[in-house]
Amino acid sequence: MNIIPWLSKREDRRSGPGAESSITRFRDEMDHLFERFFTDPFGMEPFGGRFAFGPRLDLAESDNDVIVKAELPGIDPKEVDLRVEGNLLTIRGEKKQEKEEKRRDYHYVERQYGSFHRSVQLPTSVDPDKVEAAYKDGVLTITIAKRPDAKAKRISVKSA
Amino acid sequence: MVSDLVNEKRDTATVTRAERTREGRTYLPYCDILERENELLIHADLPGVRTEDIDINYERGLLTLQGRVDPRREDRRFLMREYGVGDYHRSFEVGEGIDASRIEAEVKDGVLTLHLPKTESIRPRKIAVRSA
């Protein structure tokens, strides 16, 4: 084989992806566990949105919109199925391999393929008719307008 | 369950000491390497990197790819931040059999494809058998 992912000198680079990943993955999982506990200790997704192979999401709020982002490199945006039902956003789709290649031709496989599915509860009531989705550089951005009654209002305090 | 999500991005600090030229975390892009008759192909996931922000270098047998990613926008209130946002950095050792001067790259939908052509000497060749 003529190309080897370069690892640090301390590690045996001939031991392949397994050696690199087990400790790293464990660490990442632990990091994530802590991160989740501190950012979201009670679970923001009451419907347990994480089934199947779920893309990782960013969920943000601006004054007028709810913005959901997912890193989904190499997908066909036409094959992404987006649904907004009530306050539940569902993203569904499939990530296909670039081209059908024979298995034996692969020296190294790290990227994930297959169907993905994720449902997420949105924080405020949204208008399902005002959803925009854009796919650029492998990142899917979904912008959903908040309902007028869900928008933040500034209440002025009158002095008596 | 956490395990149901896409694998978390790996911080380069866990694998190699990457050069830090910018603030923030740096991630190892997930890569597939496959071999074709006349070339090796690397597919690297670089979501969120614009074409002009990809930097590929080859020096003394080491092929390095870098992708610059803008940090998250500060004007928004985040409720979920499940994936890391940061630059990508990864190096590959390229062996003798690759013609480094003809390495080519293209990017589409956040996936970088590197073509590493094999040198003439290692390409498979069909040898004709003559009858005596």
Image: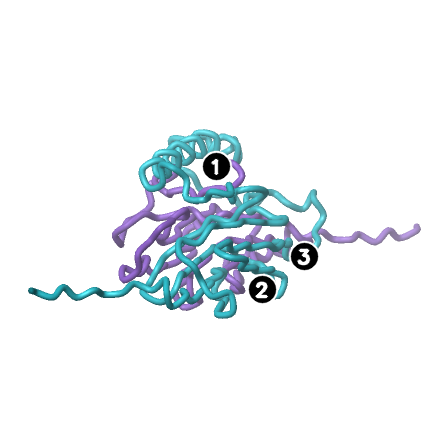
Where does label 3 land, which residue?
Answer: A99
The secondary structure type at the circle numbered 3 is: loop
Mark 3–mark 1 distance (CA, rounded to whole Å):
30 Å
Q: Earlier in the sequence, mark 2 or mark 3?
A: 2
Where does label 2 land, which residue?
Answer: A77
Amino acid residing under circle 3? Lys
Residue depicted at x 36% and y 35%: A31
Where does label 1 land, which residue?
Answer: B2
| Shown colour of chain A | cyan
Q: Is residue A87 above or below residue A32?
A: below
Q: Chain of mark 1?
A: B
Which of the pair B88/B19 is nearer the observer? B88
| B15 with respect to B111 (left or right) | left
Amino acid residing under circle 2? Pro
| A52 with respect to B88 (left or right) | right
Mark 2–mark 3 distance (CA, rounded to whole Å):
17 Å
Determine if residue B34 is in view: no
